[in-house]
Amino acid sequence: MRRIALINQKGGVGKTTITTNLGHALALAGHRVSVIDLDPQGQLAANYGIFRAPSKGIDQVILNGADPATVRLGIRDMLTLIPAGARLQEVEYRQDGGASRARLLLHALEGAMTDQAFVLFDCPPSSGLLVANAIFAADEAFIPVSGDHMSLNGLAKMLKTLKRFEPYLDRPVRQWIGLNRYFPRRRLAREVQGKLRQHFPEQLLSIPIREAAAIAECPGVGRTIFEYKPSSRSAKEFMLLAEELLERSPESAACRP
C-alpha cells in the first residue's frame, strides 16, 4: 500500500482537484484506492457528487477510534472515500496527548484498509495538527505547485516543514512535486517550471496539469474529469500523471531536496 499526502501550506494550488482526479485515474487503471479528506472544509465529498456533507468521517476515526471501515463510502468502482466529518476541526484544538497527537491518524490506520493499493490524503492549506498527522501517516508527499512565484514560496515552506519532521519519523517521506494549473503560454509559468526542473529534477513529475475550464467546472456537477469530459486533454493528463506515479517506484524519489 502506498499512502500519499497531497500537501502544501499554500491554498489555491489544487490539492483537492488533484486528489479527486488522480484517485479516480488510479482506480480506472485497476488499483483499489481510498481517498481521505483531512480538510475540515470537506470539499472532497462534493467533488464526487456527495453535496450533503456526511456528518461522520475521518473525524470519528481520529477522535473516537472508530474503525475506518465504518465510515468509508464506496463512490466509484475500485474507489472509496472517507469524508472529513463534522468534527474534524476539533483535532486542531486537542490539548491532551502531547506529541502523540501528531500520530493519531497513523495509529488509527494501522492494520486498516490493507486491501487498498493507494490511500490519498487531501490535506488542508495549513501547517497544523491535521497536516502533522498526514505527514506521520504517509509514506510519500505529493506537493502541488502552480505556475507563480508565490507557489514556489509555498513549496519552500512545505519542504522546510517536512525537514523539521524528519528526526521524528520512523521512515523518510518520499517527495513528489507536481505542476498544476499550468498555463504554458505564460512566461512566468515556464520560468517556474524551469526552476523546478533545475532544483528538483528527481522529485518533479514530468506531467503538468494545465489550466482548463473543464477541470474548474467538474466540482459544480460532482464529477471527475473522466466522467465530465473523458476525451479532454485534461483527462489524458491525469491518466498520464497516474501512470507516471505507478512507474516511479517510491525508492526512486529523493527523500530531501
Image: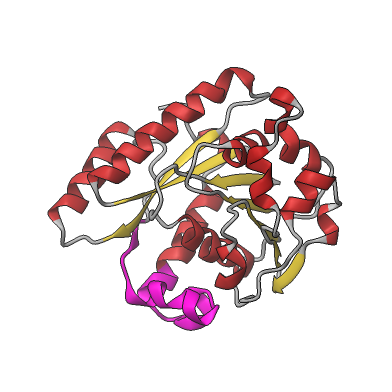
Residue nearest the viewer, comparing 224 with 2:
224
Report if residue 176 lies within the magenta region: no
Query: 187 or 67: which is nearer to us?
Result: 67
Dividing the picture into quadrants, the one containing residue 208 is bottom left
Residue 89, visible in the rendered structure: yes
Query: In the image, is 2 to the left or to the right of 63?
Result: left
Which residue does the image show at 30% across and 40% down from the upper left?
A: 152
Residue 2 % position (x, y): 65, 45
Horizontally, residue 47 falls left or right of residue 71, namely left
| Residue 189 image position (x, y, % from top left) | 21, 52
Residue at 69% x, 73% y is 75
Image point 49% across, 74% down: which residue?
A: 219
* Quadrant of image for the C terminus: top left
Q: Quadrant of residue 48?
A: bottom right
The answer to whether residue 249 is above or below residue 76 is: above
Q: Would residue 255 be visible to someone looking at this image? A: no
In percent of width and height, residue 106 lies at 73, 37
Residue 88 left/right relative to 24: right
Q: Position of residue 126 (x, y in %)?
A: 49, 42
Q: Say whether residue 218 is magenta.
A: yes
Query: Residue at the left extreme?
Result: 187
Name the residue nearer the viewer: 160 or 247.
Answer: 160
Q: Which residues are magenta?
A: 208-236
Q: Residue at x 27, y 44 (%)?
A: 150
